[in-house]
Image (cartoon, rainbow, N blue to C red):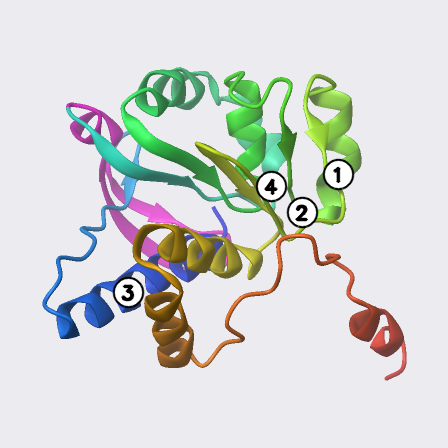
Amino acid sequence: MGLLDLTGAQTVFWAATRSLADLGLPGYTLHTASLQGGPVRTAEGLVVQTVRLDDLARGPMHTLIVPGSPHIRQALVDSSPLVEWLRKASSLASRTTSVCSGAFFLARAGLLDGLRAATHWAMADQFERLFPRVELDREAIFVEQDPLWTSAGVSAGIDLSLALVEADNGREVAMQVARRMVVYYRRPDNQEQWSPLLQSQYGTQ
């Protein structure tokens, strides 16, 4: 699991809860879960405490976010239990989303068949080979196919989460969250993953 895939989205919803509290409105209750629960080591080495996935799938859920992994090929080897859980849990969630290569798990569960989706640009070839029934948008920062949302790599999960907060609470709350986090309000979903500015800077140092 990539750390920022998880914590970028979590921070957006945490900041949204603070902004909503200032308005006297209820916010989000966040849970970090894994198949077995307990500590999970991220790809970057930080250990995150989790609850069991089965403990979450006992009632309705609002937003289910699946983070990705830089080692997605290895992660897919033993993905059957997670994929089966996703099939069931997605029917209980108002929306199911992914960050980065988390889209691989949604696709493996059959949730993205016939739909557009996004994932990290570096994994696009592998994604298309494995999931030919999914229309991969190689350029998009994130793709909304409500109730399924997918995003490109790493920081794009923040853009996705800001869009989700805006969908729930309006533009002003989402802008307050962006200000709290000191990030650009939200890159448009159709912005290229390799922006013209990044392309011009690449290889110049």
Q: Are marks 1 and 4 in contact (CB under 8 Å)?
A: no
**Of helix, strand and loop, which one carries label 4?**
loop
Please determine whether, in this image, residue 72 is positioned above or below residue 182: above
Per the image, the residue denoted by label 3 is: 16
The Cα–Cα distance between marks 1 and 2, rounded to whole angstroms, is 7 Å
Q: Are marks 4 and 3 in contact (CB under 8 Å)?
A: no
Q: Is residue 55 magenta?
A: yes
Per the image, the residue denoted by label 2 is: 120
Residue at 83 percent of width and 69 percent of height:
196
Q: Is residue 35 visible?
A: no
Which is more N-terminal, label 3 or label 4? 3
Bin the neighbour count of mark 3 within 10 Å (Cα to Cα): few under 14, some 14-19, many 20 and up.
many
Residue at 50 percent of width and 18 percent of height:
109
Point out residue 140 in the picture as x, y percentages from the top left corner.
69, 49
The boundaries of the magenta stretch are 37-58
Bin the neighbour count of mark 2 within 10 Å (Cα to Cα): few under 14, some 14-19, many 20 and up.
many
Point out residue 53 in the picture as x, y percentages from the top left corner.
26, 30
Q: Nearer the viewer, mark 1 or mark 4?
A: 1
The Cα–Cα distance between marks 2 and 4, rounded to whole angstroms, is 12 Å
Looking at the figure, which quarter contains the C terminus? Answer: bottom right
Q: Is residue 84 magenta?
A: no
Which is more N-terminal, label 2 or label 3? 3
Per the image, the residue denoted by label 1 is: 124
Q: Which of the numbered marks, if any, corresponds to residue 71?
A: 4
Point out residue 55 in the picture as x, y percentages from the top left corner.
16, 29
Which is more N-terminal, label 4 or label 1? 4
Q: Quadrant of residue 184?
A: bottom right
Which is more N-terminal, label 4 or label 2? 4
